[in-house]
Image (spheres, rainbow, N blue to C red):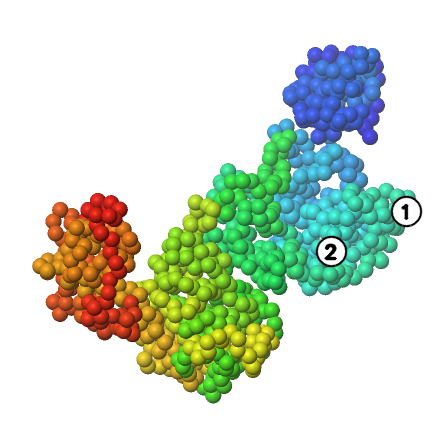
Amino acid sequence: MMSRTKAPSRNSRISIPEIKAAARGHWNDLLQDAGLPVDCLSERGRSCPKCGGDDRYNAAKEVNETGAVFCRQCFGDKSARIKPGDGIATVAWLMDTTMPDAIRWLAERLGLNRQHEDKTKLTKEVDIITTVCRDKRMPVESFTRFGVKDAKRGREKFRVARVNVYSEVGIVHSYFDLWPGSKGKFKCGKGNAGMFFPGQLPVAGQTWLLVEGVKDAAALVGLGFHAAGMPTNKLANKYARLFSGVDIIIVPDLDLSGVRGANYTASNLSGIATSVAVARLPGQVKEKQGDDVRDVLRLSNGEDLVREAVDAATKWEPCGDDDRVEAQPEVIVTMDEAAVAAQVVLHLGKLGWDSPWIKQRYRDGVRVFVRGGLLVHAIESDDLGSDGRLAIRALPSCLVRERITQSCRLLIEKEVEDDIEVKPVRPSGWLIEAVLRRGHYGGAIRPLSGIIESPTIRVDGSILQAPGYDLRTGLIYRPTVEFPVVPHLPTQIDAAKALSDLHEVLAEFPMLDGADRSAWVAMVLSMIGRSCIDGCVPLFAITANIRGAGKSLLVDSATLIAYGHRAGRHAFTRDDNEMRKVITAVALAATPSVLFDNLDVQLGGAALDAAITSLVWSGRVLGQSQMTGDLPMRTVWSATGNNLAFGSDIGRRGLPIRLQSSLEHPEDRSGFRHPDLLGWIESERPRLAVAALTILRAYFVAGCPIQSGGDWGSFENFSAVIRGAIIWAGGQNPLATRETALACDDTTGLLGKLIVGIEQADSSGEGLTTKEIERMTFGRDVDSPSHDALFEAVAEICGDRFNGRTFGRRVRGLSGRVWQGQFIESKPAGGGVKRWRVRNVESGFDGFSGTGLSSSDTKTKCEQGELSGLDRDDLEAKSVPQRVNPSNQPESQPANDWGEL
């Protein structure tokens, strides 16, 4: 309603120019006194205060100088009595009076009556505090107790009632401005909100009412209550300590946000205040804009209704989720993008760990981790048969956006009407990219090493058997069954009993000897106790003499005990590029074990060799140009095959487990003690898993006594812990099976052929260039008997057609490696050409490129006739493949010397 002021009498004549001159610079105050809300003094489009039309009303940009306003509805009608243009017309329009009456009213306000000497002094000052109280329906006396004073705000310097604002430590740190027609605003800037108190802070033993805002608080103080106003409809946790030892009654507005806010406030005060109760005002709860205390007080018996509601307040009880609720932290988005992104990362790292606004049952699902510089999360797999197991997946940009909004509120500060408004915003593209691709998070986000479903043992020998995230290992332990407690101080006798329990699984496998049983136990202990091995773990190669001997079943038995599911199969490839993609995917997903099943090719390759003896791995993210960071490589590798063949470097990285069946068709065997072995293991898994951990725990309790005979380069810690624990518990040395891998190294035979072949063909002893070797094996000198052994070696490397680059690369990889006291070296021949020649170990290693092995490795052989370890006489006598007449074979590559490549 517009306020009306009676116009002065018509007994004096006032000059219009004199009125305008005196009013210049004072029109804002004059128009407010005439009934114009202060919000309507802006030049921006607003609803008309007279007709209520949307976006029809505007104030002139220089309204304080001219007083001019315009409404398309009110002034658009040609029959309108008043035309817009100056402040006099505006007053006449506001007050529904004539222009002469408006002039006289202004003259009185400006003190321009003829009888006054001072024609420029205002005769009546606007009492802004009284005006605000009248506008907001507050008692003036109780409102002034909140530290109110007359002040001016904004560029226009319009008058406001300024209220003190208290911080969480109970001191005045800011202010809140009220003026007619507004809801009020805090001081501009972040962190200036706070509490409203009537000149005193709560004291233990008192009863205080809590309401939203200073207006309802002032109304309750007017009724004789101790009342404080909250900055919003809910009390942040940081303000709760101001009410320690106080009896609290919360009086929420009658809308859904008010009711929710009351529960929010009560949960934060519970345990701090002496008691917490909630009063229910009379009326219906609306979805929004429900009645408040002052609305109830307007009723005829409003004061009695408010007092009755306070007296009938009921004790607050948690409803469903009794966790403390706290408002999300806020981040002001500024031009300093680095600082904004850093704040968001800090809050993202706390999401799910220290975010009470997220309900307890949802917190695990919103947590964000980092792995190899990439953001990841742990999610339940939707695949059939996965039984809801957790899997590690890269966090896509769409979910980064969601997690940011769940972790904090993004705000922007915007200047509106000479004031600063804070508004929420959604995460923008630059912020999502800055968070997603920064690569390093400075410890703000927790690393994720993997997910386990069984207890495990840490590197210090302590047992991890409490479900959840383990900060010391970076593992999430999520058991799928209930496990017995691992003994805290097991003895050697306990370890021996546990070893016997594990051997029960092997009762009907055709293990070659006791060392193979120990090698299988080593695989189980490596899988379930990977966290206690501070180093690399060898590849476990299950090899058998015949199909159907149980190779894959043996691996599945181990993974079922350690992980609760069968081994994950991956296709094996000799292509290093493809293998690198597989390894990168495995490392990124923290896959605990990988099985290459039923190999029919040689096991090995540069990529796989590197992965086995690496603690970190880095590769290109599939489908992207982005590289991963250093990913932890904790995977346990295994492979199966009949009579597995090992590459030169994989032989020393593998621990064979040998099966030797005496049956022609072992797959047809029946009469097993456990016909469904995996089903039996699944039912006995808790016992068997704890047995495996008991062996390791007992060994640590005993101080890890050193067990001799276990030196193994690149796998020192595995040998000391896993091998040591097995031998200490009464098992055989699992490293005894290594002789199989070393003996079945296919490159040993190739090296022998090359040494014999080069030595026979090199009659001068000066060595052979790659061009000369091509001529002797695929060129005009092919028929010489002294070249037979060399031809066989070259044919094995190059196939049916000589390739200088392939030959040079392979020979360079074997140069310096000793076979029966000899090795191949490369010797410069001038012009960038190199010669390959054979030398004895006794003559020294000077002058060759490559690295040799120790003399203890020079006597390694395989059975006679095998490619991996033929004696010199065998190689010379062995028949060579039929050669193609040089005149009939396809034209060979140019005879360049590729030996140096």
Quadrant of res 366: bottom right
Residue 770 vs 483, above or below: the answer is above
Asked whether, in this view, residue 690 is left or right of residue 518, the answer is: right
Quadrant of res 190: top right
Residue 254 vs 848, above or below: the answer is above
Q: Is residue 388 visible?
A: yes
The residue pinned by badge 1 equals 301
Q: Residue at x 90, y 44 (%)?
A: 300
The residue pinned by badge 2 equals 263
Q: In the structure shown, which secondary structural element does the residue marked by tag 1 occupy?
A: loop
Q: Residue at x 54, y 71 (%)?
A: 560
Give x and y (percent) for residue 509: 48, 78
**10 Å neighbourhood of mark 2: few (<14), some, or many (≥20)?**
many
Q: In the structure shown, which secondary structural element does the residue marked by tag 2 occupy?
A: helix
Query: Hey, which residue is sitting farthest right in the picture?
Result: 300
Q: Residue at x 76, y 62 (%)?
A: 317
Q: Is residue 898 visible?
A: no
Give x and y (percent) for residue 293: 81, 47
Residues at discs 2 and 1 in contact (Cβ within 8 Å): no
Instruction: Using the image as rendered, state which of residue 188 and residue 670 is in the foreground.
Output: 670
**10 Å neighbourhood of mark 1: few (<14), some, or many (≥20)?**
few
Residue 685 vs 210, above or below: the answer is below
Q: CA distance from mark 2 to mark 1?
A: 28 Å
Please identify the quadrant where the N terminus is shown.
top right
Which of the marked residues, 2 or 1, is nearer the chain's N terminus? 2
Instruction: Using the image as rendered, state which of residue 407 and residue 897 is in the foreground.
Output: 897
Instruction: Using the image as rendered, state which of residue 206 and residue 615 is in the foreground.
Output: 615
Give x and y (percent) for residue 519: 42, 76
Give x and y (percent) for residue 26: 68, 23
Q: Amino acid at mark 1?
A: Asn
